[in-house]
Amino acid sequence: MNEFINEKMMPIAARVSQNKILVAIRNGITLALPLIIVGSLLLIISSFPIDAWVEFLTKHGLVDILIKGVDGTFGIMGLVAAFGIAHALAVQYDKDGVSAGIISVASFLILTPHILNEEAGAGIPVAYMGAKGLFVAMVVGIISAYIFTWFINHNIQIKLPESVPPAVAKSFSALIPGASIIIMWLVIYAIIQKTGIASGNIHDLLMQIFGGPLGLLGGTLGGTVISIILVSTFWFMGIHGANVVNSVIMPIWLMNTDANRVAFQAGEELPHIITQPFMESFVYMGGGGATLGLVIAIAITALKKNASRVTKGIAPLTLAPGIFNINEPAMFGLPIVLNVSLIIPFILAPVVNAVVTYFAMATGLVHGTVGVVIPWTMPPIVSGFLATGGHISGSIIQIICLVLNVLIYLPFFNVVERQNRKNEAQEEV
């Protein structure tokens, strides 16, 4: 098994994880996460489920101010991604990422339809600047960065003397490729407008193209289970599974998250169960493989009198960070990577979490996620409470899943523990 993984699977997994487009999408969208977390905090404050608190905010006119902050953070997710993806891709080719990012932002705005109002003038819908614009941000960012790189590689640029300040030189260097890219997107916008494809809206067009296939993978229980299996398989081979698989599905999760946020603010039924908080707070408790259940199983085993020295030593090193969803000590210290004894629970535990939580939310036993994005280091129980908008049911389902995870991991870790004790007994002899 190890020989097959090392010789056949590892090279493929390594190439996939180092794919420049996947890295650019991941890093570009991640650039917007601090804004999303800040917006989530403002959303929690504005709608915390205590009537007296909500009445206080409403009475003093603070709700609208807080919601303005939510729209100003969630509402530019797509715009930030357009910059971040182009920047990340250009940097990988040792080109000026800032210029590539700025050109991408301008192209994104050109492609986005305007709202015309006689009194207020032209405007851009906040929805398309936010999560609904992620597909356009991805396409524009990737294509713009590649074209920008091509121009620079072929020396189609304005070069100034070395005595000119670097900032000025870079601006002029980006002039020709920038003008070409912007004109290209402007022509594409005109064609879509004139032909009436997808009502003249490229956002709707790309949603039809990408939304269906990715929605099946990221918006359904079956697709989610497949993504979990892929993530765990990559992790088992030592590749950061979330960076590979979730880079592709993240736009769907973020769109679902934002749709839930809008519905929650409007007092409407939440349209989606599977969102980014669903995955991070309920499926991957402890990190990839839902390893918080494993480190708790290790801690329980370490309390036994006949526990191996390895288990007693690794228990505190894995439990403390595991509570905060940091599982690298367990991944590479236990290890989980390439440990055939733990591959089954490593896949099974997060799958069980997804299935149990999905049906609990679908049946109304547990409140759905309200569009609040929790920092990934937030410990379970607290994260479930916040992700569901302050509902205790979110914490309860996390406790249930944790118990199930411990029960799943415990018999498999006992196999590892018996081997540890056997090895130590042989060393003593």
Image: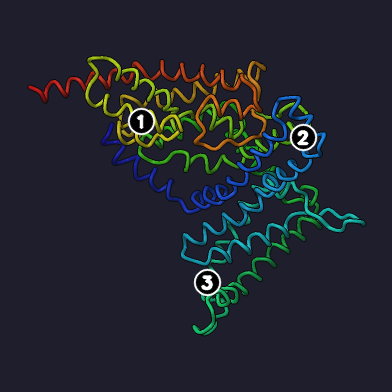
The quadrant in which the N terminus is found is: top left
Mark 3 or mark 1, earlier in chain: 3
Residue 73 position within the rendered picture, expressed as x and y whole percent measured from the top left = 67, 47
The quadrant in which the C terminus is found is: top left
- Asked whether the viewer can see residue 237, the reply is yes
From the image, tell me which residue sits under label 3. Answer: 152
CB under 8 Å between callouts 2 and 1? no
- In this view of the protein, which residue sits in the foreground, 298 or 354? 298
The residue depicted at 46 percent of the width and 16 percent of the height is 403
Residue 344: image quadrant is top left
CB under 8 Å between callouts 3 and 1? no
Mark 2 or mark 3, earlier in chain: 2
- Total marks shown come to 3
Seen as rendered, the residue at the extreme left is 429
Amino acid under disc 3: Ile
Say which element carries label 2. helix
The residue depicted at 64 percent of the width and 35 percent of the height is 372
